[in-house]
Image (tube, rainbow, N blue to C red):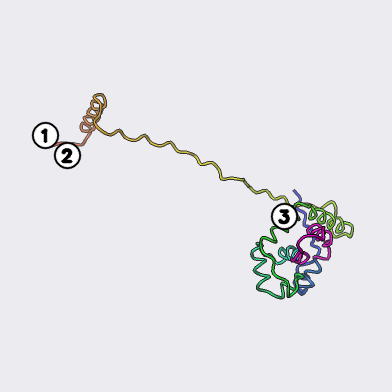
Amino acid sequence: MTIIRQPSLFSIQELYDMEPTQKYEAIISAIDLDAIYHNVTKKSRFGAPEELNYAAMIISTFVRYVERIPTIKDLVKRLHDDIAFKLNCGFLVSDSIPSEAAYSRLVTKLEESGVLEEEQEKVILQAVAEGFIMDDTVAIDATHFEARDQAPAKEEKPKPEPKKRGRKSKEEREQWLKEQAEKEANLPLYDKKIEAQLDAS
């Protein structure tokens, strides 16, 4: 199987050399944020006003992957603790930090609208048209990994039958006496009872 190494749009050194704001602009500028913003904002002027900065929330959602922030909880914490990061994501100083629930609702809207898939396709087609990606080498990572929606069923081991309590039946007692006699007969001389040892001498 031929391994194809696909070049990046930006080199690692270029991304590290750029300031945070410039770095985010270089990556986000290729995405049509207006189309994404249109899908998550309310369409009517009636009702309660929207107090969340959705544009900044969308940018911070993308920046989360650039900065390798693993969870939404960590993203919210970073926005609380780092004022420069908050401003670089497009929030105003006066803007309140969105909650985890607000981000969850945003992601749900984006998933239901399908706008992210549309924008991804546009970016890929644009990269192909500009020569960054060759259409004969483009691929989507589909690494196989085992997944299941529930834990595997446990193997039930048969339970041992409990020993019967009380006196043995006549047949069981006779069988038991026979087994004991065979055991004693096979014992070495010095392990047998005194009577058996006297008879041997």
Callout 3 environment at 10 Å: few (<14), some (14 to 19), or many (20+)? few
Real-space Cα distance between discs 3 and 1?
89 Å
Q: Secondary structure at mark 1?
A: helix
Q: Residue 171 occupies which quadrant of the picture?
A: top left
Q: Which SS class for mark 3?
A: helix
Disc 1 crowd, CA 10 A, few/some/many (<14, 14-19, 20+): few
Q: Position of residue 5 (x, y in %)?
A: 77, 57
Kindly report the distance in space between the C-alpha atoms of the residues bearing marks 2 and 3. 84 Å
Q: Nearest the camera: 122 or 61? A: 61
Q: Nearer the viewer, mark 2 or mark 1?
A: 1
User: Which residues make up the magenta segment?
Assistant: 28-56
Q: Is residue 61 left or right of residue 195?
A: right
Residue mark closest to the camera, 3 vs 1: 3
Residue at the limit of the structure toward the top, as seen here: 171
Disc 2 residue type (three-letter): Tyr
* Percent x, y of residue 19: 76, 75
User: Residue 25 falls in which quadrant of the image?
Assistant: bottom right
Which of the two labelled residues, at mark 2 and mark 1, occupies the earlier sequence position? Answer: 2
Vertical side of 113 occupied by 60: above or below: below
Indicate yes or no whether the magenta region holds residue 37: yes
N-term mark: 3 or 1: 3
Q: Which mark is residue 190?
A: 2
Q: Which residue is mark 3?
A: 108
Which kind of residue does numbered mark 3 sit on? Answer: Thr
